[in-house]
Image (spheres, helix red, strand yellow):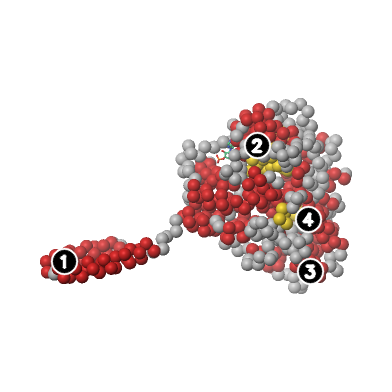
Amino acid sequence: MSIRGRKIRNNSDNEKTVKTSASSSIMRATSAQSRTMSTLLFILGPALLLLVLMRPMPMSIDQEVNTLVSQETIQSRLMPTKLPSPVVVNADNTILIHQKKSEEKVTAEDDDSKEEDDEDDDDENNEDDKANKNQDPTATTLSTFHTDPILRYLEKELSNNQNFQIQDSKVYQQANCIVPDDQEFCPSPDSDDAWRLRTPGFLIIGAKKAGTTSFWQSLTQHPDIVGASRKEILFFTQVQFDFAKYTKMVDERLAQRMTELSDDKLVDSDLFQHYANASAFQIRVAPSRADLVTNFPRKTLRNRPNAVSLDATPEYLFNFPTSIKAIMCTCPWVKIIIILRNPTDRVWSHYNFLQHVRTNNGKPPINMSFEQFILKDAKTMSTLDISSFQKTEGKDEQALSEEDIVEAWFEYKQEFPEGPLGRSMYALQIHQWFKELRRIGRDPKNAVRIVRLEDLKRGGKKAAQILNELADWVLPNDKHNATSPIEYLDAFRHGMKTNYTKLGSPQLSQDTKDILDRLYAPHNELLARLLGDERWRYSRDDTDEQPLVWPANKGGEGNAVFERTSIDQKGPCASR
Ligand SMILES: Nc1ncnc2c1ncn2[C@@H]1O[C@H](COP(=O)(O)OS(=O)(=O)O)[C@@H](OP(=O)(O)O)[C@H]1O
């Protein structure tokens, strides 16, 4: 019997005794005693009641979520500061995430010219580098590593190796890629292999649960839009990205060199590990294009000179710390489509997906309520042990640098790969994509299109028009309009629409929804400023049904100007 059970039995034994003696006491009780009791109760009663009412109540799950998902916990860690200052979105859509003493704007060009300077005379400039780094939080880890003897050694060794030639093309230097000597990398546009340059022609990079599957199904209606062998090939994510192959080679070479230098102080296992990691993440090794194209129907592409291929992997948007580099090193000409959705609705859909779809697929469901799910994520975000976060904590004057954010994001993804809350922080992710595109000399307005699921969901002529124009944009040679707007829309409508209510999903509680809307408000604000239209705020009061496409027509109609451009073959192939 449990201790609790025993207590109960003892209590009932006692009860009998108490009952017997109580009845005789009552018989003997005098009216004077009764009066005293009544008086005491009259005086103490209200005080006791007050004490009971003031007792601290346990927190409800909603309150707990509210506390954790507050701007002080997540916001301060994932966004550099509270809006509006010092986050400044400039007219040209660059975001100034920190304030330097001089209030000087940091642009991609500044970064580039700094790198070039570093390369010219990095020995002499070690001190300068340090000084610059103190002044400018966006001074990249790259410049730190440039001052490093082991990285210099690696660079020297790798550039001497015939299998690892650093391409002399500027774009590759800027993207900091080391391109393996891949014979298939630069086929002549007239050769039978020219199709490789259209592989992939464009990407749908996210967001997850924003209708990417229907979007893929819609665009592949066109006979010249050829999907990869499956949706979500994940080629440019860390898992598929062939870092291992190249880092293994780097590591082996490093290990060999370390053995040769066995007397050297540098032979230290921690240090070795550190630089092995650095070799993977600081020196971006381009994945092999030969491996990439195996994910596409090569025969179809070879036989159709106008065809453009599509990889739709929503993981890429979220996976920016590694995916952007891998993509820019492998197919820098690629066009990018992003589809967004109200951030709170996206998180809810994400939860339902994991709860139901995975179960149906035989994979283990996430066995928690929606509130527990987002609490877990909020906790991950707020308790991340990332030195770069801690470094800046409490120092308002020195906000996080972009490098810190990228690093933090990387760790966050490791901690909770689903990252349901983080994935809906769109501005932070899109900004990184824009920044990287500018870095290799591409204008995001030419390279990217962003649309909303809400506009496509509504259907009608305008939704059909968006899909049609996007197809036009990615097809350089579409002279025959093989697919009509209505066909695109029909395919979108019949895409992977789900109805979780039928699957038995509970409704999203209004309180939780409000909390999430509050969490995302500043992120949406930043998105609206980044994309130059306040409707990207995703305000629940917004009744404007005008479709929203980025970049918007300056005329204010909200429709993008879709220019038909041929695939821009930037990169080392362009100069050959
Ligand atoms: N045509 C149409 N109309 C309305 N809603 C649509 C449509 N197509 C897809 N969806 C909704 O998009 C959600 C799935 O998004 P994804 O395909 O991107 O999911 S995934 O990331 O590939 O798993 C999923 O959202 P939820 O139902 O809210 O979970 C789909 O229902």
When the figure is inspected, residue 358 is found, relative to residue 134, above or below; the finding is: above
Which is more N-terminal, label 4 or label 1?
A: 1
The residue at which mark 3 appears reads as 131
Residue at the spot x=76%, y=26% of the render?
Answer: 480
Image quarter of residue 99: bottom right
Neighbor class of circle 3 (other Cα within 10 Å; few <14, some 14-19, many 20+) is few
First in sequence, mark 4 or 3: give its number.
4
What is the x, y in percent for residue 431? 70, 51
Q: Considering only order in the chain, which callout, 2 or 4, is on the residue closer to the N terminus?
A: 4
x and y percent of residue 296 in the render?
71, 38
Image height of 40 relative to 92, above or below: below
**Point 28% across, 68% down: residue:** 43
Q: Cβ–Cβ below 8 Å for labels 4 and 2?
A: no
Looking at the image, which residue is at 71% across and 42% down? 550
Sequence-wise first label, 2 or 1: 1
Which residue is disc 4 drawn over?
107
Q: Which residue is mark 2?
A: 546
Kind of element beneath mark 4: loop
Tag 3: amino acid = Ala
**Front residue (pair 95, 507):** 95
Q: Which mark is residue 22?
A: 1
